[in-house]
């Protein structure tokens, strides 16, 4: 399993890097607008029909999958690195398999949920 993890490490780093970008730029902007500014009345909140229309388009679906799936990979990689920093290098293979498995399942569930939207 360790050899497999070493082979897919570039893909994991790609997903991790994109998760940082999505989590930092898009997700924080979304939370700011929909979680702070809309309830304060600074911006108009989306009606259900408008939000569903945005989420039903192809670009909206891609953005939704990215907003859900990529931060999962970011979190998995951060937890793995934290475990290694605190002396968990001897159990890294098992933890990496578990964490990346959770991120994979979460990503697949996000894809299924957005496709069924």
Image (cartoon, rainbow, N blue to C red):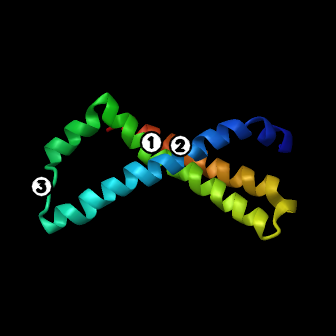
Look at discs 1 and 2 and give the one toward the viewer. 2
In the image, residue 82 sits, relative to residue 23, either above or below, namely: below
Number of residues whose C-alpha sits closer than 10 Å to that of mark 2, classed few (under 14), some (14–19) or many (20 or more): some
Residue 108 or residue 59, whichever sits in front: 59
Q: Position of residue 84 (x, y in %)?
A: 78, 63
Q: Residues within 10 Å of mark 1 (few under 14, many from 20)?
A: many
Residue found at x 62% / y 55% = 76
Q: Are marks 1 and 2 in contact (CB under 8 Å)?
A: yes
Identify the image quadrant of the C terminus.
top left
State the mark number for residue 66: 1
* CA gap, disc 2 and disc 3: 29 Å
Q: 112 or 93, which lies in front?
A: 93
Q: Which residue is mark 2?
A: 18
Q: Which residue is mark 3?
A: 44
Question: Mark 1 and mark 3: span between their CA atoms?
Answer: 24 Å
Report how far apart the C-alphas of labels 1 and 2 lie in the structure.
9 Å
Earlier residue among tags 2 and 3: 2
């Amino acid at each position: 399993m360790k050899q497999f993890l070493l082979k897919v490490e570039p893909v994991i780093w790609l997903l991790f890097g994109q998760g940082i970008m999505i989590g930092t730029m898009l997700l924080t902007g979304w939370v700011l607008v929909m979680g702070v500014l809309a309830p304060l009345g600074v911006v108009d909140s989306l009606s259900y029909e408008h939000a569903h229309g945005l989420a039903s388009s192809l670009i909206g679906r891609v953005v939704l999958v990215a907003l859900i799936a990529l931060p999962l990979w970011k979190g998995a990689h951060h937890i793995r690195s934290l475990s290694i920093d605190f002396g968990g290098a001897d159990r890294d293979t098992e933890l990496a398999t578990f964490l990346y498995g959770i991120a994979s399942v979460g990503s697949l569930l996000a894809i299924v949920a957005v496709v069924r939207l």
